[in-house]
Image (cartoon, rainbow, N blue to C red):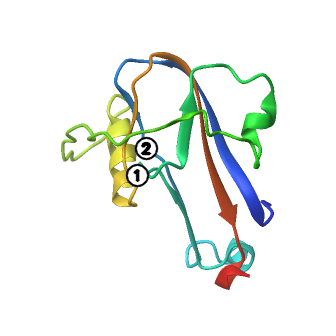
Amino acid sequence: MVSFGDHVLSLVLEEVPNDALLAVSIVHHAGRVPLISQQLGEVLKLLSDADGTWKSTTIKPADDQWMKSGFDDSAWTALELTQPPALEKRRMYTRDNIWEMSLQMTLDAGAKCLRLNTPGQMWVRRSFQLTKAGGK
């Protein structure tokens, strides 16, 4: 179980291609998982957005402190908004195009596409706070 307080979603992206994008949707609805809801509250949403909270660097961090709350990421670059690719409405998804369905569901949840325009390895972080229902 994740404790209340400050947290960091940290990603190490290997071999990022040119013009890649990132879209993240972590959503918890109380009606779907009632037992966990007693701890998390009614709704938890962590969505990718170009709001300055999603930071990245291509310089390998010296240690794992970058994955912890309180890390100074002010020198890291804020990820910027990019347009999602055109997605086709499909009657059936296959192994080759299942990413389209996954991206569409992520966008439908309210996430935005963020540009990962530096090829190679990249470290991405997003700080967030997990509070009890009612903000207590």
Determine the residue positioned at 58% across, 33% down. Answer: 76
Rendered image: mark on residue 106: 1
The percent coordinates of residue 110 (x first, y second) are 38, 60
Comparing 68 with 32, the one in front is 68
Determine the residue positioned at 19% across, 39% down. Answer: 86
Rendered image: mark on residue 48: none
Comparing 90 with 112, the one in front is 112
Neighbour class for label 1 at 10 Å: few (<14), some, many (≥20)? Answer: many
Evaluate if marks 1 and 2 touch, with contact meaning CB atoms under 8 Å apart.
yes
> In what quadrant of the picture does the N terminus appear?
bottom right
Mark 1–mark 2 distance (CA, rounded to whole Å): 7 Å
**Quarter-of-image position of residue 5:** bottom right
Indicate the secondary structure of the residue bearing disc 2: loop
Depicted 34 relative to depicted 123: above or below: below
> In what quadrant of the picture does the C terminus appear?
bottom right
| Residue marked by disc 2 | 23
Comparing 48 with 2, the one in front is 48
Q: Earlier in the sequence, mark 1 or mark 2?
A: 2
**Quarter-of-image position of residue 119:** top left
The percent coordinates of residue 66 (x first, y second) are 73, 36
Amino acid type for the residue under numbered disc 2: Ala
Indicate the secondary structure of the residue bearing disc 1: helix
Q: Is residue 131 left or right of residue 65?
A: left
Determine the residue positioned at 62% across, 35% down. Answer: 11
